[in-house]
Amino acid sequence: MTTFSRRAFALSGLAGSAVALSGCDRINGNTAPDRLDARVDATLAEMFATYGKTRSLAARSTGMLVLPLITEAGLGFGGGFGRGALRVGGVSVEYYNTTKANWGVQIGANQYAHVLFFMTEDALTNFRASDGWELGANVEAAIYDDGQNFSASTTTNSAPVISIIFGQAGLKLGVTIEGTKYSKMNPPDRF
């Protein structure tokens, strides 16, 4: 009879998460800029149709980072990955990926769309100038399940960055201590 140590259990969880996340590129498919832009367009259309008040939020923003698909998986240790485009004036100006590493009491996998609205020119400039921007305390978060209405307080607050997460699929249970990092993809034609 084989017995497992806590270390072996933790390593198997980490290995399982790595295997789950290794399929992210296959889930995202061909991620050339034109294909990614098409996914960004579809994500924005879905968000505007489902949460109509986000149109005014987009109109007031100086830019939006649109990540059409973020995939997360975890069993104790977990992580996530996604790619997207920074839109300024309705045009994709740069491409980014996001990575997330977390630990805590968690199990499962899920996918969702994520949009960051930069509400001030300073917030957008700082994001673009950073070498790996991390989600911080100056971000107002809004997570929506199907059927929820967009909160008026979220659309009128003075946060420099507002984060919208919607279109969740899958199930991930538990509490995590997480860090999400956004990095510019260079060169964009090779992702």
Image: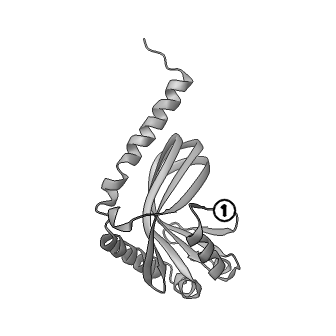
37 or 113: nearer the viewer: 37
Please name the residue that numbered disc 1 is placed on: 136
Indicate whether 131 appears above or below 40.
above
The picture places residue 9, in percent across and down from the top left corner, at: 50, 28
Q: In which quarter of the image is residue 141?
A: bottom right
Q: In which quarter of the image is residue 169?
A: bottom left
Answer whether residue 169 is visible to the viewer in this image.
no
88 or 164: nearer the viewer: 88
Quarter of the image containing the C terminus? bottom left
Q: Which residue is drawn at 57% across and 57% down?
A: 180
The picture places residue 123, in percent across and down from the top left corner, at: 64, 75
Answer whether residue 82 is visible to the viewer in this image.
yes
23 or 173: nearer the viewer: 23
94 or 112: nearer the viewer: 94
Asked whether, in this view, residue 51 is left or right of residue 151, the answer is left
Disc 1: CA contacts within 10 A as few (<14), some (14-19) or many (>=20): few
The picture places residue 54, in percent across and down from the top left corner, at: 54, 81
Classify mark 1: helix, strand or loop.
loop
Which amino acid, by three-letter code, is at mark 1?
Answer: Gly
Q: Which residue is drawn at 60% across and 76% down?
A: 125
Q: Which residue is drawn at 67% across and 76% down?
A: 160
Quarter of the image containing the N terminus? top left
